[in-house]
Amino acid sequence: MRIHEADDQEAHGIYIRLLRSELTIDTLLELKDIGKQYQRRAALQGVNLSLGRGESITLFGPNGAGKTTLMKIISGLMVPTKGEFLFCGKPASESPLRRETFYLGHKNALYGGLTVLENMDFAQRLHNRRDKGSVEAVLREHGFWERRDDTVRELSQGMKRRLAIARAFVLTPPLLVLDEPFVGLDIKWRRSVLESIKELKQAGAALVLSTHLVDEGYELADRIMFLDKGKALFLKRREDVGIDEIKEMFDGPPAPVVPVC
C-alpha cells in the first residue's frame, strides 16, 4: 500500500539514478565452498552461490540452519573458516563497494535518543551521502514525515522496524542483506515494505533475504536456497520450486541433499 503516489514516484527516481550511476558491475558476489566452523560444530558446509545486480535470493530453513551465519559472512560481520568470497570479482576484503552493503539483522540498530530525521541524517553521514531530498521522500513514503521530530524511543516496535528498513532507501546500497525484515510489521506495512524492496531491486540492488514468512519470501525471490544443518539442500530458480513444496519442507523431515545449480 503506497502512502503518497507523487512522493513514491520521486523516491523511486532517486533510487534508480543513484544505483545506476554508481554500480556498473553485473556480478556482485560469488561464494565458493563456504564453510564456518565453531569448535566442533559446523555452522555452514560447502555453500556455493552467486548473485547478480538486481537479483534476489531468499534463504529458507528451520532455526539453526545457518541462515544468519551465511548472511553475516556476506555482510562482512563474520569471516568464513573455509572457501572463497568474491565481491565484484575481487576478494571481498579488497572491494571498496563491499563496505556499501546494507545489513539488517534481528536488532534495528537505531539511536533511541535521536529523532527519526536525525537517525536518517546520521545514516547518510556514515556513508558519505548528503541528499536531504531523498530523506524527505523516503520518510513520506514510509509514513514517517509527520513524526520526523519524534525520538525513536517514542515509536512502537513495529514502527522502529519500518524505520530501520527505511534507512536502506536513503543509502541506495548495491546489496541488501535482510534477516527477518518483516518481524513486528502488520499486514499493511509488510506489503508496503515488500513493494519498496521490489523497487530497489528494479533499480539494480541485489537482495539476500531470510524470512519464515514463506509467501513474502517466495514473492521476492528470483532463486531460493533451503538450508538445513548448515548445508544447502537446494538452490533453485523460483519457477522450479512450488510454494507448497517450501511449506512442506518446514513441516516435514529434512529433504535429501541435491546438487545446487
Image: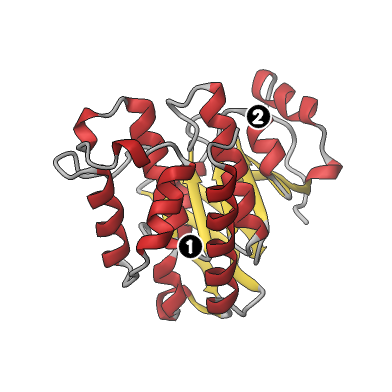
Q: Is residue 47 left or right of residue 223?
A: left
Q: Position of residue 4 (x, y in %)?
A: 54, 41
User: What kind of residue is marked 2?
Assistant: Val
Q: Position of residue 146 (x, y in %)?
A: 33, 37
Q: The N terminus is located in which quarter?
A: top right
Instruction: Residue lying at the far top in this picture: please name it.
Output: 251
Q: Which mark is residue 172?
A: 1
- What residue sits 60% from the left and 65% below the top? 16
Instruction: Residue lying at the far left in this picture: please name it.
Output: 113
Which structural element holds mark 2?
helix
Q: How is the protein colored in the picture? A: secondary structure
96, 138: nearer the viewer: 138
Q: Is residue 245 left or right of residue 56?
A: right
- 27, above or below 55, in the image: below
Which structural element holds mark 1?
loop
- What residue sits 44% from the left and 44% below the top? 140
> Mark 2 packing: few (<14 Cα in 10 Å), some, or many (20+)?
some
Q: Which mark is residue 214?
A: 2
Residue 11 visible to an observer of this rendering: yes
- 159, above or below 209, in the image: above
User: What kind of residue is marked 1?
Assistant: Thr
82, 106: nearer the viewer: 106
- Residue 20 is drawn in which quadrant? bottom right
Q: Position of residue 149 (x, y in %)?
A: 22, 41
Mark 1 near mark 2, Cβ–Cβ under 8 Å?
A: no
Q: Is residue 84 left or right of residue 93?
A: right
